[in-house]
Image (cartoon, rainbow, N blue to C red):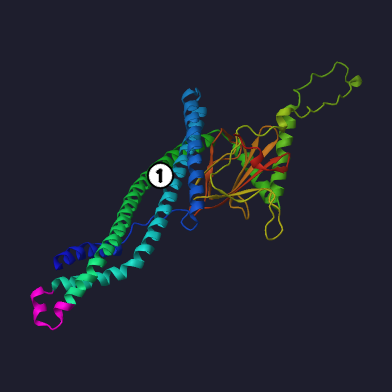
Amino acid sequence: MLHRLALLAAPIAAIALVVAAPQVRGQGVEAYEDADAVRAAIERAQQASQRAAQRARSLEAAAAEAEQEAAKVARQSAALAARIQETEAQIAVAQGRLSLITRQQRALDARLAERREPLIRLTGALQNVSRRPLVLSVFRPGSIRDSMYLRAVLETTIPEVRGRTAALRGEIDRSRALRDRAETLLAKLAEEEGRLALRRKQLAEIETRKRLAARRRGGEADRQEERALAFAEQARDLDGLVARIDAAGTLREELAALPGPVMRPSDPGRARTRAIPMPAPTREQVRSPAGLRLPVDGRTLRGFGSVDSSGVRSDGILLRAGGGAQVVTPAPGRVAFAGPFRGYGRIVIVEHPGGWTSLVTGLARTDVTVGEQLTEGASLGVAPSAGGPIGFELRLGGRPANPLDHLSN
């Protein structure tokens, strides 16, 4: 009997030690939300990763087919930006799964902690009994009767103890499996972060080459940038800046639509001026910008038309971006403004065909220059290193439009 007690005490003691052992903890980006929100975030990140991978493959194919060096470099840059967003989404998936594992481990720890103290006390009692030699019971009055009573009690107790310890052993095996999964995810996370750092370095090298080439092109880009900075100084608020840029863009289109020089008439005295009709708006001008997408992947913090606590109505949407997240152009177009603007961090305004204008705010760094022509998915810059809100507004002829109504499928 005592031998059986000793055999039973050993696994219980081992269980108590495993319960007390530290657990692997994953620090997911969604660690403080409920489990359903974490699962939803994982699903969004998986979808974002698939979309970014598809864009990257398309841009890589276009870069391989491009004949001009400038077009090839632009598409390579956009492809790298898409690969960066793909990697960021994969990191978000891994962090979300680590968060779920952490929650499961905490719940398991709580259940095991409830049973830990009784198990330790039972282990100590059984070990004390197993260490007392049976022959000493003969020299104590009542020892034989007590031993018989203890035997009867243990005959009914031991099966129950075995059942409970078997359940605990199952939960401990589950805890070990969770630790193994967490370690695998941590290794994958480290691998993805290394890949992300490499791709960001490659993109920075390409953007540096593009900026050097833009400087060599001469003074027209400098004049455009000075004009844009003057607009920013004159504008009282963001709406005023966008209005000035829209007006300049409209004027530029009207000038481009003017006919070429007219030959001097043979009889200037009888010449008559003729009104030049401006072209009517085409169907293209009311269509959504081609390939419009969100500039950054993230959860929507504020929707279009929502009213904040101060009563200000939102002309766009606000997205929660991860730390240092890649921000890309919503659609191909021309950079009308890029730089800091009071109260909005660094912003980028892009003019798209058909009278559309997009505005992206809250960037920590901008990678584009005024006058630069952007291809699909070209990098605009990055979000702050600690993460933060990225604003996105879409306008047609200066009037705000809901970006979500114009996104490409």
Residue at left offset 24%, top offset 71%:
153
Q: Measuring from the top left, give residue 286's x and y in whole percent.
A: 72, 33
Q: Measuring from the top left, give residue 218's x and y in whole percent.
A: 57, 34
What secondary structure is the magenta-colored segment mainly?
helix
Q: As drawn, which residue projects farthest toward the bottom?
A: 141
Residue 323 in sight from this viewpoint: no
Where, quadrant-wise, is the N terminus in this rendering?
Answer: bottom left
Q: Which residues are magenta?
A: 132-145
Packing grade of label 1 (10 A; few <14, some 14-19, many >=20) is: few
In the depicted structure, whether residue 266 falls above or below residue 274: above
Which residue occupies the foreground of this view, 117 or 294? 117
Q: Is residue 393 left or right of residue 41?
A: right
Which residue occupies the foreground of this view, 380 or 121? 121
Q: Measuring from the top left, give residue 35's x and y in whole percent.
A: 48, 54
Residue 90 in sight from this viewpoint: yes
Which residue occupies the foreground of this view, 64 or 137? 137
Question: Regarding mark 1 in the picture, which secondary structure is present there?
Answer: helix
Q: Measuring from the top left, give residue 114's x and y in whole percent.
A: 36, 67
Across the whole image, how many numbered discs are drawn on residues? 1
Where, quadrant-wise, is the C terminus in this rendering?
Answer: top right
Q: Quadrant of residue 137?
A: bottom left
Residue at left offset 64%, top offset 46%:
229
Residue at left offset 13%, top offset 74%:
132
Q: Is residue 221 left or right of residue 201?
A: right
Which residue occupies the foreground of this view, 5 or 400? 5
Question: Magenta stretch: residue 135 in it?
Answer: yes
Question: Magenta stretch: residue 292 in it?
Answer: no
Q: As drawn, which residue projects farthest toward the top?
A: 266
Q: Quadrant of residue 333?
A: top right
Q: Identify residue type, mark 1.
A: Ala
Q: Identify the residue position indicated by label 1 in the image.
A: 197
